[in-house]
Image (tube, rainbow, N blue to C red):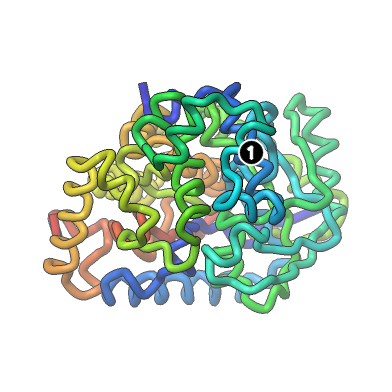
Amino acid sequence: MASVDRCDKTLPLNEMMFYVRKSKALRDRWNTDLAGLCREFGVSDAEYQALRDQDVRALHEMGVHQYYVPQMLRLFYGASANSNAHPALEAYKRAYPEESARALELAARLERGLGGPELRGPHVQGQGR
Amino acid sequence: MATIVAAMAMTHSPGLTGWFERAPLQQQLLAKKAMDEMRWRLEAAKPDVILGFSNDHLLNWPINNVPELTVGIGEEHVGPADWYDEWLALGKYRIPGHPGLARYIVNEGARRRIAFSYLREMQFDDGFSVPMHYLNPFNAIPLVPISMNCTVPPIPLPTRSYEVGLALREMVKAYPENLRVAVLATGGLSHEPGGPRYFWVDEEFDQWFMAMLAKGDHDALLRECTLEKMEAAGSGGTAELLAWIMALAFTRGPAEVLAYMPAVAWRSGTGMVVWGEFA
């Protein structure tokens, strides 16, 4: 099963995120009244605790749509300059250390091994692999 | 009768505007050069309208009611949506729409048994904001945006996207006014937004996909590029390439690959292609 297929479309937390992203008033309550916000949308205690604890793996396992998870983290930490070094993404490195390390090693290798831009076309076999 | 005058596709990852400089310099240069080339070719084609294909990132529709396809039919489009402007590091922009073509697609689609939802005020995330920033920077070319769902199950199959593309091609060509139409697909390549492999890029898949486009055998691509293969290369993100497959239906023969880079810094395989022949 692909990871996106674990999404529970009926989960209240998924419904809540749609409205939070659209409303500044709701976004402003994220860091001051998260518990109250969750209550208003019928979010369960387990969902709330996973959200409060920024537990990425638990959020995935309970069926939060995976696209929403980094959006939740950005609400805690801010959205600007959201590179791989952004504090909002540290929770991913904790939840999926092996997957994250593998990707970031690839990034480092690519940075070290890249040739000039003219060498990166797909017609060039084996470059940088 | 409308005429297809350009067809092209590019990645729309938010890093291309939001944290562009965090990628290796070579990737920045290659991406910028390719997007400049796309813009020049787009302008040289002198389109009256861009028919854009992208995907909604759970912004326009709540998860309990996600349509397969949505057309933005407004007189004008305003973006990015508030939640996205800081992330994308983009100021607000306004692009003229083309309600005549957009509403025609909604209604003609229904006659052909394709359900296009529509929005008079479509919200814009990275899907259209990033490509418009680079390809239509003065917002001079009107846009008809069509978003598709590729991230909330059930995700359409590539063969379905190609069928929709074929139907759109027939509809657009039968449009009762003279109109020069540029087709632009945005999204992909491999990435898994928010999933366990959030930072990963599947370079092997990306190189294979680009090579298939460069080969230009549509039947082979549709036969081999299954949804399962896309999901294996990055769940919930790589299937943004369904927009490219919709655009493919407007073309004939090989695509010219302007650039490809496994841009882990932008959390997405990143590529740009243009087609030279139109079906």
Front position in the image: A9 or B16: A9
Observer able to see residue B106: yes
- For residue B253, above or below residue A66: below
In the rendered image, the quadrant that contains the C terminus of chain A is bottom left
Residue A18: image x %, image y %?
64, 40
- For residue B268, above or below residue B38: above
| Secondary structure of residue under mark 1 | helix
Residue B45, quarter of picture:
bottom right
Question: How many marks overall?
Answer: 1
x 37%, y 26%: residue: A2
Q: Which residue is mark 1?
A: A36
- The answer to whether residue A64 is left or right of residue B94 is left
Label 1 neighbourhood size at 10 Å, few (<14), some (14-19), many (20+)?
few
Q: Amino acid at mark 1?
A: Gly
Residue A81: image x %, image y %?
43, 68
Front position in the image: A112 or A67: A67
x 69%, y 28%: residue: B65
- The answer to whether residue B68 is left or right of residue B11 is right
- The answer to whether residue B86 is left or right of residue B169 is left
In the rendered image, the quadrant that contains the N terminus of chain A is top left
Residue B144: image x %, image y %?
73, 55
- The answer to whether residue B264 is left or right of residue B147 is left
- For residue A54, above or below residue B179: above
x 28%, y 42%: residue: B205
On what subunit does the disc labeled 1 rest?
A: A
x 85%, y 36%: residue: B107
